[in-house]
Amino acid sequence: MSLKKKNFIFIGGVVLLFGLVYWAGISAEGPPGRTGLGDQPDLSEDDKTIVFPYYQDGDASLSFQYEVFHMTREGEEVEQVTNLHAFAGGTLFFRKSEQFLITVDRNFAGRDHDFEYWIFDRDGSSSKEVIIDIPDQREGG
């Protein structure tokens, strides 16, 4: 697939997400207290559920808090899945699964990122952090 075609498909997917969220009654400003859509939506393999990040204003440090929501492909049943009070994005459904992976950055507004990876059930009923221990490959480290 050419790069132009991939970009077209991605842009079309983002436009579709914004359209579905608007159609579902969540304006571009988001649910009450929210200020906008994030990027990186993902569609489940069964084509029934979309997960996507939504952001709201943070505290006085001018940071933003992203949480992950899910909805039907038709834009109905919009529900918040996470309640992490951090940057939550990078949504990715596992193939043939009811679970998805997200990236969390507890220091999103800071200089040094603090990444975590979490697996959530589609409905948010269960979650667990994925610990990745990468050995230091530097000399003397």
Image (tube, rainbow, N blue to C red):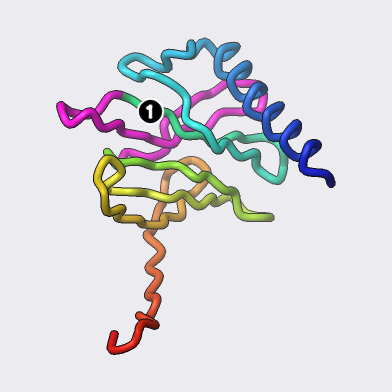
Q: Position of residue 11 (x, y in %)?
A: 68, 29
Q: What residue occupies the far bottom of the structure in this picture?
A: 140
Q: Position of residue 36 (x, y in %)?
A: 43, 20
**Which residue does the image show at 40% across and 17% down from the upper left?**
31
Q: What residue occupies the far left of the structure in this picture?
A: 60
- Left or right of 109 in this view: 13: right
Give the labeled residue for mark 1: 55
**Which residue does the image show at 33% across and 25% down from the upper left?**
56
Which residues lie in the magenta part?
57-83
In the image, is residue 25 part of the stretch drawn in magenta?
no
**Which residue does the image show at 34% across and 14% down from the upper left?**
32
Q: Quadrant of residue 95?
A: bottom right
* Disc 1 packing (10 Å; few <14; some 14–19; many ≥20): many
- Left or right of 35 in this view: 2: right
Q: What residue occupies the far right of the structure in this picture?
A: 1
Q: In terms of secondary structure, where does tag 1 sit?
A: strand
- Left or right of 1 in this view: 48: left
The residue closer to the viewer here, 128 or 19, is 19
Q: Position of residue 35 (x, y in %)?
A: 37, 18
The amino acid beneath tag 1 is: Tyr
**Which residue does the image show at 80% across and 37% down from the upper left?**
5
- Left or right of 54 in this view: 98: right
The C terminus sits in image quarter = bottom left
Whether 94 is drawn above or below 53: the answer is: below
Q: Position of residue 90 (x, y in %)?
A: 50, 45
In the image, is residue 60 part of the stretch drawn in magenta?
yes
